[in-house]
Each structure stands twice: as C-alpha cells, then as structure tokens.
Image (cartoon, helix red, strand yellow):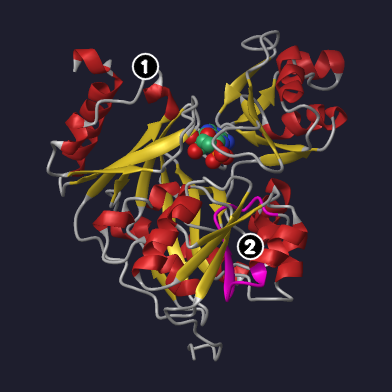
Amino acid sequence: MTAGGMRSLWPGATIGVLGGGQLGRMMALAARRMGYRVVVLDPSPRCPTAQVADGVVVGALDDLEAARHLAKQVDVITLDTEHVPADVLDELARIVPVRPGAGVLRTIQDRLTQKQFLDGLGMPQATWAPVGSAGELDAALALVGRPAILKVRRAGYDGKGQARVEPAPETEGASGRWQPGPETEGASGRWQPGPETEGASGRWQPGVDAVEALAKLRGEPAVAEALVRFTREISVVLARGLGGEIQIYPIAENVHRRHVLHTTRAPAPMPETQRARAEGIAVTIAEALDHVGVLAVEMFELPDGQLLVNELAPRTHNSGHYTYGACVTSQFEQHVRAVCGLPLGDPRAMSGAVMLNLIGDLWQAGPPAWCEVLARPEARLHLYGKDAPAPGRKMGHVLLLDDDTDRALRTAEQVLAALERPVAAS
Ligand code: AMP
C-alpha cells in the first residue's frame, strides 16, 4: 500500500503509455530496467517508444476502441503527451487507473483553461486575453499590448501554433510607444496609447500584421500574451506521488532557439530565496491539480527577479532530460515510481549538467558525424530512433556532465558546431 492507502504496482506489472514519442521511450527504458512491462498506443508501430516496449497497440490517440484495447492489457495508464482527449481518459479510467487523471489534462491541455486555473491560484503570468474570434483581436491586443504572441488554445507545442504580433508601424513612436508595464517593471510591458490615438479614433486600432498573425493560426481559438522581456527562462521539474509526497529536481535554466529548447543547464545558478520561490510556485500548482507523476512548470525570470509562469506540462519534460544521467533518479524512473505508487526516488544531482537538443536540421546533409560527441568523456549521446529527420524535429540530445556548467555550455556550442560540419570536413 502507498501512504495514501492505494495499491502499489510492483515490478512485473504492465504500464500502458498513450503516445509513443521520446518521453515514452525513455520512460519505457527506465520501467523495463526496473522489471515492468510496457505497452504503448501510437499510430506508428515503429514509433520511438514501440522500439523499446513489450507491445504496441497501433491507433490514433483519440481512437477510443484502440485505447480500450490497450487498457485491457495493462495495470495503469500514463501519458507521453498531454494531447490526448480528456474524454478518452475518462473512459479508460473505468477500466484501469489513469495517472495523471483526466481532470489534470482538462485543466492543462487548453491554454485558456490553464491560464484561468493559474489566475485562480494567484500565480503570476504575462498579461493575457482570449482571442476566440477575429472580432476579439482588437480588444485582446488593447489589453495585452504589443509586441504580443498569439497562441492556439489547443495542441500547440515548440512554438507551433504561435504567431508574433509586432508593434503597429503606423502608431509606433507617433501616437503611442512601447512602455514597460508597472506590474512587470520593464519585462512584459504594455501598450500605452498616445493622446492622438485616443483623441482621433477613440480607440487603438490593431495594424494589419495582427490580422495576419491571427490568420496564421487558421481560425483556431487562441490566447494573446504580452511579449515578456525576460532575463532568462527556468523550469521546475518535480514529481508528486500517489500519496501526495513531492520531490523536486534542481532547477533548470533553459535557452530556446526558434521556440524550441536549445540547451538546459542544471542546476541553474540562483540565490536560495529565488530557488525557494520557484519551487513554491511549482508545488502550489502540483497540489492544486492533485497531480500524480512528473510535472514541469516553465517560468520567465524578469530583471527584478519576479517569476511569471509560462506553461505547464503534466509529464516528463525536455528540460528534465538532464536528470537521466546527472541525477540519482531520472525523471523517467521518477514518473514510473509515481504512477505505480512506489516511494519516490532521490532527485539529487550527482554532477552539474548541460543538455543540448539535437534537432532534425542537423541531418540535412546526412547523419551527423558523432565522433566529436562520442570522443568526449563528459558527453553522452541519446538518440530517439526517429527515422525521418525534419527541420525543428527533436531527434536526440547530448548530455554533458560537468560541475562547471559555464564551461559545459561552451562545450555544447563546440559540439553543435562540429555536428553541423559536413561529414567530409570533420
Ligand atoms: P511555449 O510553447 O508557450 O512554451 O513557447 C515556446 C517559447 O517561446 C518559450 O519558451 C519562450 O522562449 C517563447 N515565448 C513564449 N511565450 C512568450 C512570451 N509571452 N514572451 C516572450 N517569449 C515567449
């Protein structure tokens, strides 16, 4: 029994995973090492998780019959992605425990609901407004200001389903100007209409670019967010067990390129008080969600130290990949432990670490020359078994174990530069 009185699933039990990407793959590797069986539901029988699983059910994530077929052969179900319809999870929960549950997904998988939930908890966020239709764009931008980012409410990730709205050229410098918002002190800012704008038209008009940005989202309901002038991005990755206990990993500092995670450094250098503040935010969210499993909370850090919550992920997270190699218990093993009702493992880092994502663009001239990575004693290569490298697609990562994380960040760029060179030149 767990602390919460629920039944633990011991090694030998079977874990079902909805979605067969790299997160499911690394979780399956951890689960199988511990003696669990793993069966995955995915449209592709050769998906990254299926390659290392005991079984695969081929089907779409919204295919209820296929999902039921999976549920009947497993002892617990978990997720590799939050983009599984919550209604499907409700149905599966009649057959087998689903962790995290449908309620967590319902809150998180729609950006609007997620933001309302965070507002309800009093969590700091960038100024935001819903854009359900083109008619709401004007009012939304008047509220959040420009520049702004439009994000589709559902199914967006890695910058997909996002469009940036630039400052309106016809008003910039003349009738209005970009001003820091008092609440964020120079970070997210808000649009201040100038006197001419107010006097002439009575209200501020969005420029054509805003309409174009919205068109890029192809009519999908969206939210508008103020563009945040952050000093850095961080994430708190934690695990919450079946009995409510929580273990928190060293905080990750993340750099994105073209909206995709580029590097993670951990532990993020930061004063103790700031670390406690970030952890407090993540713990409050995990408890309010009644989450079970790994949860990642992405945050923006502002010049004055304020933290804004950017996004929640109710699963293992790319910024936690460093834990697989650097920490006593990886986020993948920790997720298995949480959803199976086992005691959580020790999240402590045994070494400083930098993770470098390997994106499909690197494969443009054929497979990269791995020598530069493999010849380095501090480097570990992880590839996800994806056979179709595409620009922007996450194909693998390199983990650099080095207590001097400034040096490791420099090493990561050297490794990347070497991998970018055509094979013949390296
Ligand atoms: P998301 O998918 O919302 O996490 O966005 C991906 C990345 O885009 C973030 O990690 C940031 O680097 C950037 N981004 C997203 N929203 C904002 C924002 N409101 N202000 C500034 N940058 C943002």
Horizontal and vertical percent position of residue 411? 19, 33
Residue sitting nearer the eye, 268 or 292:
292
Q: Earlier in the sequence, mark 1 or mark 2?
A: 2
Q: Is residue 187 visible?
A: no
- Disc 2 crowd, CA 10 A, few/some/many (<14, 14-19, 20+): few
Residue at image location 66% in from the left, 76% down from the top: 96
Q: Magenta region, mostly helix, strand or loop?
A: loop
Residue 150 in view, yes or no: yes
Q: Residue at x 46, y 29 (%)?
A: 389
Inspect the magenta stretch and tell me whether residue 82 lies in it.
Answer: yes
Is the C-beta separation of discs 1 and 2 under 8 Å? no
Q: Taking the image as four quarters, which one is ligand 1 found in?
A: top right
Picture layout, residue 415 above or below residue 211: below
| Amino acid at pointer 2 | Leu
Q: Report, in whole angstroms, how far the alpha carbon at label 1 lies from the one at label 2.
A: 49 Å
Viewport quadrant of the C terminus: top left
Magenta range is 71-84
- Residue 134, above or below 333: above
The nearer-to-camera label among 1 and 2 is 1
Of 185 and 36, the residue lying toward us: 36
Residue 365 is marked as: 1
The amino acid pointed to by label 1 is Ala
- Asked which secondary structure carries label 1, the reply is loop
Give the percent coordinates (x, y) of residue 344.
39, 75
Residue at screen point 23% across, 23% down: 418
Q: Does the stretch in magenta take in 342?
A: no
Report which residue position mark 2 lands on: 121
